[in-house]
Amino acid sequence: MANHVDAIVIGAGFSGIYMTYKLREEGFTVKTLEKAAGVGGVWFLARYPGARCDSDSIYYNYIFSEELYKKWSWSSRFAAQDEILSYLNFVADELDVKKEMQFNTEVKSAIWDEDQTKWLVITAQGEEFTATYLISGVGCLSTSSIPNFQGRESFKGESYHTGNWPHTPVDLNGKRVGVIGTGSSGVQSIPVIAEEAKEVYVFQRTPQYSVPTRNRQFTEEEIAQFKEAFLDAREIMLNSPSGLPIPRSTRSVVDTPEEERVAILEDAWEKGGMILNNAFYDIVIDPKSNELVSEFLRGKIREKVKKSDVVEHLLPYYYYSTKRPILDTNYHDTYNQDHVTLVNLRQQPIECITENGIQTTEKEYPLDIIVFATGYDAMTGTLLKLDIRGRNGVSLQEKWENGAKVETYLGLGLAGFPNFFTITGPQSPSVLTNVPTAIEQHVEWISDCLNYLREHNVKTIEPTVEAEVQWSKQCTEIANGTLFTKTESWYTGSNIDGKSRDFLIYLNGLDNYRQLCNEVAEHGYKGYQLQYEEIKA
Ligand code: N01
């Protein structure tokens, strides 16, 4: 007989920690199953050199509790991976949720039992659990991806993916290191790897725009000020499109006179962080606006890179900010060092990996270590890896046609999958916001929903097909009005060979989204169908 609880939560990252706490506090029994050996989600796994958050640390945390917020002090503007992991352990201990969590436990399948109206969850370790509700907290970027390079297994040196970095130090000293990939992980790790390694070869397919992090240690006075301003900052975060205390911009790039525009961009550049990409409202809407900002950023790369034969290969020409904006510390400057070599894969694609290194169409690069900074099967990758079966045994793979037709309602629920909720699921604002703020909104909405079901004797809840189709259509229409869909990126799924192209993020802002979700709840879960318990006379 399987262990039964009210709710099973999959994953113990930002989502799982808060969801577990919230439901337990509301009097539900909860079991949280986590594949890794501890809490943290992606912050448990992505320990690569230089791993650091690119949201300001003082906002990249839970804001539901003033007391909790004030108990923790961040050491610097952008926290490193180990500090974020310590923070998540601190929160899990403060909320005392580890007792509801089971680590080293990988959910393999979850099957809806129509007769019993409950989920049967089976783990890779052979355990079985049943639950009335199933809640995914697996995150949007938790399945790392290594492209299918021919000969990868033959490499005799060491190789690592940035998203699954070893827990013991990797000795780079005196080594020849090849890094494939120049997304956030590559851009953060390359300068740090170059400090230690004897030779660094960067295998770049697409050059990147990047804005300085301008990281720095906080003073005690600053920390006291942040805590003092917490309630005001939270109010703005909860009502902003990004979940950050940055109001919606009303400024257009093209409509701002040149002198003023450049002054705004220079100011944002000097301040660093995510200010620049939020400085105008039309950067990802109007190609002309985008080009003006893109050219400003290309100018910065030209200033930084001193080697004239290298700089031209580092200039990006995609629409700025339609790939995830990158923050860096000394990234472009790194190419001024003689032991760092840029390999332009547009000119010499990788043919295969050999036992000695990487073979491009031009030559073989002998290496001791290969770092795959090649990203994630984002948005749907982890969900589709789980064998989740809803009504009539229909699997998520079947429903979503293996990713070719992803439809959800609010990014929170799926027709045909009763009592199943996805925190930061596809078609919610998720990764185009400050993710912890988006997570809190979902967790609180799901918790309120479960309370409603309990109070109203509702046995099952699931979106209607019509609501799902309508929501998905709306998400696509909004995305098609932007430049996001015109770029190859993990946002569109085009980073994974064979994956269907789709833009699965709700783009109208967390503020509007929050209001929509509240309206759905206030109207008795509009767009959902509810099945009530039979009340015995
Ligand atoms: O992954 P990416 P990431 N041959 O997909 C290249 C979050 N994050 O791990 O651009 C050669 O962005 C690929 O090239 P191209 C953040 O949201 C946050 O860096 O597809 N190259 C690209 O350069 C981020 O956006 C933080 O042409 C290949 C790179 O690999 C997200 O995670 C830190 C290739 C992958 O870049 C993912 O970032 C780290 C191939 N076959 C991550 N396939 C912070 O908070 C792929 N590439 C700071």
Image (spheres, rainbow, N blue to C red):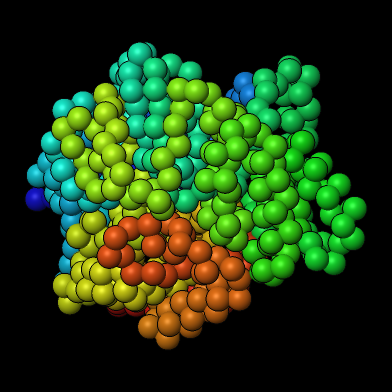
Q: Residue at x 72, y 68 (%)?
A: 288
Find the residue positioned furthest to the top.
173
Quarter of the image with the C terminus in it: bottom left
Residue 2 is situated, as x and y percent measured from the top left of the image, at 13, 50
What percent of the width, then of the height, locates residue 282? 72, 65
Which residue is pictured at 42% across the width and 36% down the height? Answer: 202
- Whether residue 447 is visible, yes or no, is no
Closest to the observer, 103 or 300 = 300
Q: Residue at x 45, y 22 (%)?
A: 339
Q: Is residue 349 above or below residue 450?
A: above
Please tell me which residue lies in front, 477 or 493. 493
Total numbered badges shown on the rendered structure: 0
The residue depicted at 16 percent of the width and 43 percent of the height is 151
Question: Can residue 394 be seen in the rendering of this structure?
Answer: yes
- Camera-nearest residue between 65 and 183: 183
In-image side of 309 versus 149 (left or right): right
> Taking 474 as reference, is 147 left or right?
left
| Residue 478 in the image: above or below residue 91 | below
177 with respect to 15 (left or right): left
Quadrant in the rendering for residue 429: bottom right
Rendered location of residue 33, percent (x, y): 27, 43
Classify residue 38 by image quadrant.
top left
Q: Nearer the viewer, residue 260 or 67?
A: 260
Relative to 315, residue 476 above or below: below
